[in-house]
Amino acid sequence: MALEIKRVGSFHLPGREAMVSGIPTFDDVLTPGGPVRTIDQNGAYEVEQMYVQFVKLDAPRARYPLLLWHGGGMTGVTWEDTPDGRPGWQMAFLEFGHDVYVSDAVERGRASFSPLTGIYGGDPFVRTKQECWEGFRVGPVGSWHAEEAERSTYDGQRFPVDAFDSFVRQTVPRWTVNDVATQTAYDQLVQRVGPAVLMSHSQSGNFGFTAALHAPDKVSAVIGIEPSGTPLPDVVDVSKVRDIPHLVVWGDFIEEGTRWPDYQNRIKTYRDALQAAGGSLDIIDLPALGIRGNSHFPMMDDNSDTVAALVQEWIESKGLMR
């Protein structure tokens, strides 16, 4: 499908200025064949910024822009082409008629991170291939093996396992201490672009729910793709978002995962609180619809277009298209 694009662009949302001192200088060659230079890393830096890329259509059908937020240890690549080279949800929702904003959150991808001591309050960690395979429900616990031929998957799983290494190349370091900075950046994005529809994945689920609570006048809908957390309903006032439609999408093999039933129960608790306050949270349970085999990344699975169409149907049912 040919798209009529008005503009493709990007911007960074500001974080904060940080001062660094006490780092010893050293000499090094920065370019092969270049001169020796003295490197002094003491001084002022911009940190905790967020990167955002947008694609605006000439005549969008959607009433509001769609913001796509990635999960933990990932970047906005989550929404671009799939690991095996098929068009991802960025393209799918452009074709549905949305202006689409894909972000790299604080410390991820093109947002950049600071390696200097003292900028963040902790150390980063990264996922192993085993954690990606078993944690994201490609195969059950114990199914990973260093030898590809020895690995096993869930029966009927839909993740493109032949491109698994390509998927792992997308992972980046993450910190557990930057939630406040990340939420602040997402809130800035909503203020800059909104009113908007927020679509989050995994770790960013909590950020999406919270962004709506922080700016209910700027959020037209909240969509969580397998969100791993929510605000605590006994701490926040969910009545603030009772007029905002919410949707959560779940894949398969939830009961077989070690942590996924707890994530699902947290969503049920948040839904109950939202309903009690007069709001709504719809759930698309893919296996319950007879759609089996989806991993934690339905936007990458081999039926990604089918799942995207279900989400789009929900968006249309809420009157969010022209």
Image: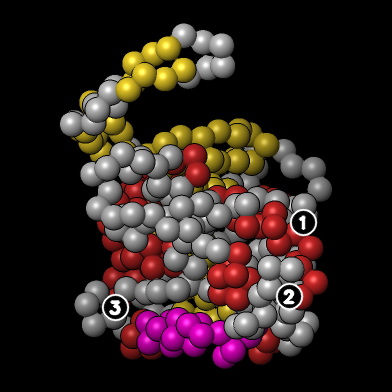
In the rendered structure, which segment of residues is drawn in magenta? 252-271
Residue holding disc 3:
232
Q: Secondary structure at mark 3?
A: loop
Q: Secondary structure at mark 1?
A: loop
Amino acid identity at mark 1:
Asp
Q: Is residue 305 left or right of residue 262?
A: right
Q: Secondary structure at mark 2?
A: loop
Which marked residue is nearer to the observer: mark 3 or mark 1? Answer: 1
Label the magenta part by its dominant secondary structure: helix
Residue 139 location, quadrant: bottom right
Residue holding disc 2:
151
**Which residue is at a point 48% across and 83% down the rendered structure image?**
259
Residue 195, above or below 319: above
Amino acid identity at mark 2:
Arg
Q: Which of marks 1 and 3 precedes in the sequence?
A: 1
Bin the neighbour count of mark 3 within 10 Å (Cα to Cα): few under 14, some 14-19, many 20 and up.
Answer: some
Amino acid identity at mark 3:
Leu
Residue holding disc 1:
84
Asked if the stretch drawn in magenta spans residue 71, the answer is no
Asked if the stretch drawn in magenta spans residue 267, the answer is yes
- Residue 126 percent coordinates (x, y): 48, 58
**Which residue is at a point 80% across and 72% down the rendered structure image?**
149
Which marked residue is nearer to the observer: mark 1 or mark 2? Answer: 2
